[in-house]
Image (tube, helix red, strand yellow):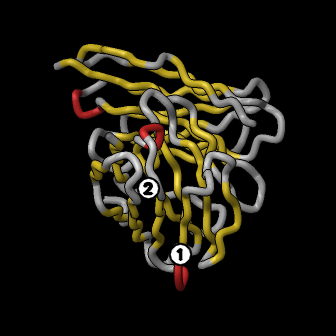
Amino acid sequence: ILNVEQSPQSLHVQEGDSTNFTCSFPSSNFYALHWYRWETAKSPEALFVMTLNGDEKKKGRISATLNTKEGYSYLYIKGSQPEDSATYLCALMNNNAGNMLTFGGGTRLMVKP
Amino acid sequence: DTGVSQDPRHKITKRGQNVTFRCDPISEHNRLYWYRQTLGQGPEFLTYFQNEAQLEKSRLLSDRFSAERPKGSFSTLEIQRTEQGDSAMYLCASSSQGKVQFFGPGTRLTVL
């Protein structure tokens, strides 16, 4: 059973603050890590797929890094806006035939105007 | 909108009743997944299909749960004799083999 953990569980920041969250996972047999953003009453939205150690990916004000040797990924949001309020999920994709996702518990971000 | 739809969005039922949910994936995706999310947890894998074949089921999927994907298009997830512990968000996702999974908005089930 894969153990994917995210911290913190929740975070309240002011508009304009920059913030980051952590996703940690077993470093052995790594295949791919996915980040999703899930706003209330909407579908989880894929942000990044990360596969290589040292990967850095960016989408607007959001970026992510990956360290497969030590088993962690960071998600950064620069200059948080109220519309960034959501739950951010990381998920490990396994390398077996089904490529199922094992999710962490999520980080719930609330950005106050 | 990810292109994956689920119906209904909310379902309230009494313990012991049967419920059925539907998922319509992105049409060209050959894989379809079901996940379940309970309060405070991340989504957990239940089962997946490649085309019409159900290839893997989690130990979370008790014998009261059954899923189908006739003709490899939409899928249904049925829960028989619902229990209060079945209350959760049921998420469906679709993908091409090995690629990003696109999720629907989920069906929130409440069992009274």
The residue indicated by pointer 1 is: B69
The amino acid beneath tag 2 is: Phe
Question: Badge 2 local density, few (<14 within 10 Å), some, or many (20+)?
Answer: many
What residue is shown at x 71% (from left), y 42% (from top)?
A52
Q: Can you tell which mark lies on residue B103?
A: 2
Question: Residue B66 versus residue A108: which sits nearer the camera?
Answer: B66
Of tags 1 and 2, the one toward the viewer is 1
Tally of marks: 2
Q: Is residue A108 above or below residue B84?
A: above
The amino acid beneath tag 1 is: Arg
Q: Is residue B48 above or below residue A104?
A: below
In the image, taking residue A77 as reference, residue A2 lies left or right, namely: right
Where is residue B5 shown, x and y percent of the image?
A: 34, 64
In the image, taking residue A29 as reference, residue B33 lies left or right, namely: left
Q: Is residue B92 above or below residue A11?
A: below
Where is residue B78 shown, x and y percent of the image?
A: 47, 63
Instruction: Specify the quadrant that holds the N terminus of chain B.
Output: bottom left
The quarter of the picture where residue A14 lies is: top left
Question: Residue B76 versus residue B66: which sits nearer the camera?
Answer: B66
Whichever of callouts 1 and 2 sits on the residue coming sooner in the sequence is 1
Pick out the residue farthest to the left.
A113
Question: Element type at marker 2?
Answer: strand
